[in-house]
Image (cartoon, rainbow, N blue to C red):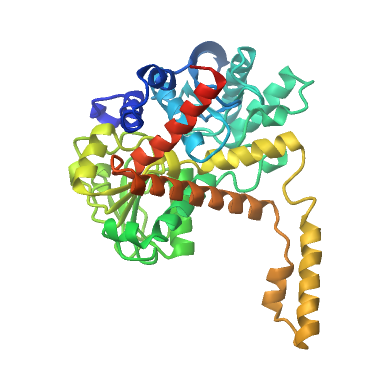
Amino acid sequence: MAEDGLAKFSLRQNVDLMVERAFSVLELDEGLANAIRACQAVIQLTFPVEIKGKVEVFSGWRAVHSTHRLPVKGGIRFAPIVDQDEVEGLASLMTYKCAIVDVPFGGSKGGLKIDPRNYTREEMQRITRRFARELASRGFLSPALNVPAPDVGTGQREMAWIADTYKQLFPEDINYQACVTGKPVHHGGIRGRVEATGRGVQYGIHEFFRHGADVKEAGLNPGLGGQRVVVQGFGNVGFHAAKFLSEEDEAKIIAIVERDGFLFHEDGINVAQAREYLTANDSLRGYPDAEFCEDRDLGLEIDCDILIPAALEGVIHSENADRIKARLIVEAANGPITFEADEILKKKGVAVLPDSLMNAGGVVVSYFEWIRNLSHIRFGRIERRFDEMRGQHIISALESMTNNKVPDWMRSEIIRGADELDLVRSGLDDTMRLAYNEIREQKLTHDAVTDLRTAAYVIAVRKISRSYLDLGVY
């Protein structure tokens, strides 16, 4: 939901308007376009839970945008601003996102209208389990049909509760762990899922910087090292993206924007220390090693090289888009730029890496987790020691032929077999690279496509429409 009511269109309308560009480029039949645009199902749930001796009534939603692939996939968010339109918009975005990164899921999304900060852990568990029962009893929670994941206000804890609730309801389903992704590793989760969206943002930026022409067009210097980065939203996605970019790529995180203001330091902020301070104080106010400003909106307008909106939707809108000074905007959140703002930014020549790609790291690794749960075996278990033995044979052959000892650092790298985290990161990196290059190629080869967002939606709509036609859905 856009902040302060500044957006002319709702999230769902914004997504539809952006996808409309792709419909026009493809000259899609209006009936088929309507079929793709439509949300196929949405359920509203209202249920009571006893809290502190009193009954409270909660409202939640689960939307299914497209079942051209099953199961449908999408997170569940717990937030006081959740409503049906937002859930439907996010579900549609999930459909396109999965198509862009070639993950065989349809799109879904869920939300519960609640502020988790107002409840204890035990109360949240009762509420979450009741919500899960309501979803499962109506076919909106299932390893084969509808698979949620974490989103704003939820995490591993809530996913473990949902999975256990499903197991109690359907004890005969041996694939019960696959009913939800983003679980703790010791409850069927996969290594690398927690940071997956932030890591995907990093990998997507890496691929952008591999193309000198794209970097030059954006008005940036080559290489990530030294790039001045502003991150808006310091939750799971924003924190991990900032951490990886600063620690591994030597980018400078000059500002961190949160709900009550922003930190600024021209020479860069220590991301790990800022995160520890935020966790301990529930605010960045008073952080000793950077300047704090209470006007959070100004944080988005700082002169920087890269702006990463990583919180809620609609933070860049028609009222502030013209004041954005970043050369490159990387959409780590869902729908952070409204349709009107997108038009303004395009006219200004600001490069935008769209959410339909840059936010996809979570669903990519969720796909890996879902496969792991269905196969009932962790990745790397069968082949890891074989790879290590083969590496040892290579070392022995090299030493035998050269009469020289292979250096220890080289030996360890050649011998080491990939573990689950290595494979997850490799798969995510490969997915982000391939998707970016497919989008880039679409932009370069089609005269009517002038930006990466439209190129991404053209690819998604083409794939989805082909499925609709092949399956006889339309």
Quarter of the image for residue 363 reads top right
Q: Nearer the viewer, residue 401 or 113?
A: 401
Nearest the viewer among 445 and 227 is 445
Q: Give the tally of numbered discs.
A: 0
* Res 290 → quadrant: bottom left
State the image coordinates of residue 383 (x, y, percent, origin top left).
Answer: 78, 54
x then y, percent, for residue 64: 51, 20
* 105 to 249, vertically: above or below: above
Determine if residue 94 is in view. no
Q: Residue at x 34, y 26 (%)?
A: 16
Q: Is residue 249 left or right of residue 163?
A: left
Q: Vertically, is 165 above or below 414?
A: above
Of residues 425 and 122, the one nearer the viewer is: 425
Is residue 336 shown above or below 4?
Answer: below
Image quadrant containing the N terminus: top left
The x, y position of residue 153, in whole percent, is 49, 33
**Residue at the bottom extreme of this rendering:** 403
